[in-house]
Image (cartoon, rainbow, N blue to C red):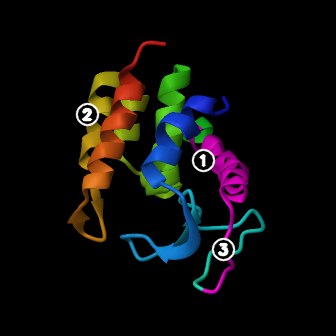
Amino acid sequence: MKASQNLSQRLTKPSEGFRSRPYRCPAGIWTIGYGTTRYPDGRAVSSNDPAITETQAAALLLANLGEYEAAVNRYVVVPLTQNQFDALVDFAYNAGTQNLRTSTLLRKLNAGDYAGAAREFDKWVYGGGKKLDGLVTRRKAERELFEEVA
């Protein structure tokens, strides 16, 4: 599967917000644009990178989504709706593919417990060891999209 427009418009862009200059996210990772931590060539974002435009940020987001789409396609063994796929790609984009791979969310989902998997989104609201309002909001939006009948 591939992510739909729903992903960037409804989840990723609003959750990440746009930042033209590099900044440290709550987990201490250098980030730019709409939550980009690595450029398409694999280079990590650094503090001395030049500012980017919203158009460049959107292109970076799209260029990087393939990695997260591939992870969801690789790790999930049960059928997904487009909304479920989009929610999981956003989760992986934010929390990381390794966290998706080892999560109880994925374990429950692959066992066919879709409702149990949906409840797991609510547990991923910590960044840098602190509960973050932005992550609470993001996980709620991911869960709602995951549960939404298309």
In the orientation shown, which residue stands out farthest toward the top?
Answer: 150
The percent position of residue 128, horizontal first and vertical second, equals 30, 71
Secondary structure beneath label 3 = loop
Bounds of the magenta segment? 48-72
Q: Residue furthest bottom?
A: 48
Image position of 105 (left or right of 9): left
CA–CA distance between discs 2 and 1?
A: 21 Å
From the image, tell me which residue sits under label 1: 68
Q: Which residue is mark 3?
A: 51
Give the labeled residue for mark 2: 119
Considering depth in this image, is 36 or 119 the residue closer to the camera? 36
Point out which mark residue 105 bears: none
Dot 1: element: helix
CA distance separating discs 3 and 1: 25 Å
Task: Tell me residue 131's x, y (percent).
Answer: 21, 60
Q: Earlier in the sequence, mark 3 or mark 1?
A: 3
| Farthest-out residue, right | 41
Q: Residue at x 36, y 45 (%)?
A: 138
Residue 54 falls within the magenta-colored stretch? yes
Q: Is residue 95 above or below residue 44?
A: above
Magenta stretch prevailing secondary structure: helix
Asked if residue 108 lies in the magenta stretch, the reply is: no
The residue positioned 52% from the left and 19% from the top of the image is 81
Considering the numbered disc 2 on the image, is that residue within a helix, a strand or a loop?
helix
Residue shown at 52%/51% (left/top)? Answer: 93
